[in-house]
Amino acid sequence: MTVRAVAAVDLGATSGRVVIGRVGEGVLELELVSRFPNGPVEREDGLHWDFAALYEHVLEGLTEAVRREPAIESIGIDSWAVDYGLLAGDDLLAEPFHYRDARTARGVEEVHALLPSADLYRRNGLQFLPFNTLYQYRVDERITDADSALLIPDLLAFLLTGARVAERTNASTTGLLGVETGEWDADLAARLHIPAALLPPLIDPGTTIGTLRPELAARIGKHLPVIAVGSHDTASAVVAVPMVAGSAAYISCGTWGLVGVELTEPVLTDAAREANFTHELGVDGRYRFLHNVTGLWLLSETVRAWEAEDGVSLDLSELLAAASAVTSDSPLFDANDPSLSAPGDMPTRIAALLRGDAPSSRAAFARTIVESIAAAFAKAVQTASDLSGRTLDVVHLVGGGSLNRLLCQATAVRTGLPVLAGPVEATALGNVLVQARALGAAPATLEGLRALVAATHPPERFEPRA
């Protein structure tokens, strides 16, 4: 049996990693090569990403991947959405801003003064999030000095290959892609005074972007192509959701919980806009009809605050075990409240939302966080069903959140549907599968790719018991 190997660069908002993926008949395996921290850094002008460090981590990881597995045939890159770098010639003008930087509020005001939100939704089908790329472009003082703007995975691909492109699934998160055409909306960009010349040519997942620059091939140890995958990490994750029918909802859960269904046609209704459901593009032209729910960010920021208070690390598994043992009713708060979006003292902000009803013990407080996230997931699942006209009979929960058994069980109870948890590494698996398919080493259809995931990474089932 022939097994093929690829390298996947998978970057999240709190960490990144490089993995080796191996694919063959009945085989789908990942080998972690490197993991490194990622997160906001405070500069004089606001929150940024330490992009130079991130790029160096990627190069180091790829070098080690090729050393371990000389048979690697390609590289694929996925990351979080909306953030970008501005280029003038081959030079990066500044560190990319972090989407949680406060400047985006002014961008929202300026964009909506030029175009009402209802008109914007009809054009781009995108849910309102204050950090969507078009709001960032609107207030970026360096934009007039740039000749191109590249989202994070495309920026890394440019540094690796020299090719300037925009992978379509991630481009759909900018707010400048026509929801029905899948092409740049140059008229919209002009109306918002965003130079359309900044927007690079669009490509689809599976397209070869280019080959490594000679000096990088020498460092990494092999001349390799960089293949476009679903470069928005959720697009890659949804590829690896082992769905077998259209009656399934999915939750890709990490820092965020992306909750929705997969469609082949958009739902551009006022009800969808008012529910803040988005139409991000998926692999093979599918729509990821979903809503962003604040996910494990709430728990991780709370734990971080407690660790700072105690001066020692907390064992998350012990905390969740204690939370699972709580028998009293858990008060709920709105997991999507805007006051919870920035870094900082999360326990105090959550307590303020609970208006004097905050649990006194940390175990009960953690339980309240998990139950509130699950309640928000359940609401989004029901709304996805109502808006799409689909009767749902199962929820797939993938990503890091699938390891949180308390969250999986709470989601089953609150949705009233069985939850199939896993795979944990859905994003990396989706990245690997799209590369392998482009190389002729994996099934040709999404359904075939998902069947391979289901066979090699069977999910754990949580029933909606009381």
Image: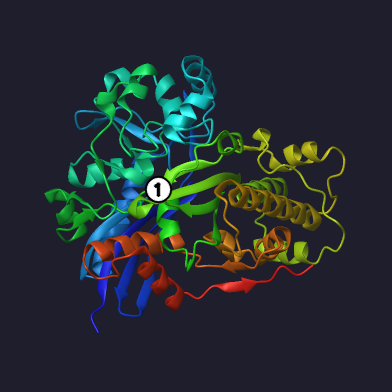
Give the structural element (helix, strand or loop) at label 1.
loop
Residue 464 is left or right of residue 432, and the answer is right
The spot of residue 126 in percent (x, y) is 48, 36
Q: Residue at x 24, y 42 (%)?
A: 159
Q: Is residue 104 visible?
A: no
Which residue is tagged 1?
A: 232
151, 42: nearer the viewer: 151
The spot of residue 16 in percent (x, y) is 42, 53
Picture quadrant of residue 192: top left
The spot of residue 28 in percent (x, y) is 36, 74
Residue 130 is left or right of residue 416, and the answer is left
Residue 251 is left or right of residue 175, and the answer is right
233, 122: nearer the viewer: 122
The amino acid marked with disc number 1 is His
Q: Name above or below for residue 209 compared with residue 100.
A: below
The spot of residue 316 in percent (x, y) is 66, 61
Q: Residue at x 84, y 50 (%)?
A: 359
What count of labels does the image hold? Answer: 1
Other residues around mark 1 within 10 Å, as few (<14) / some (14–19) / many (≥20): many
Q: Residue at x 72, y 42 (%)?
A: 334
Residue 22 is left or right of residue 290, and the answer is left
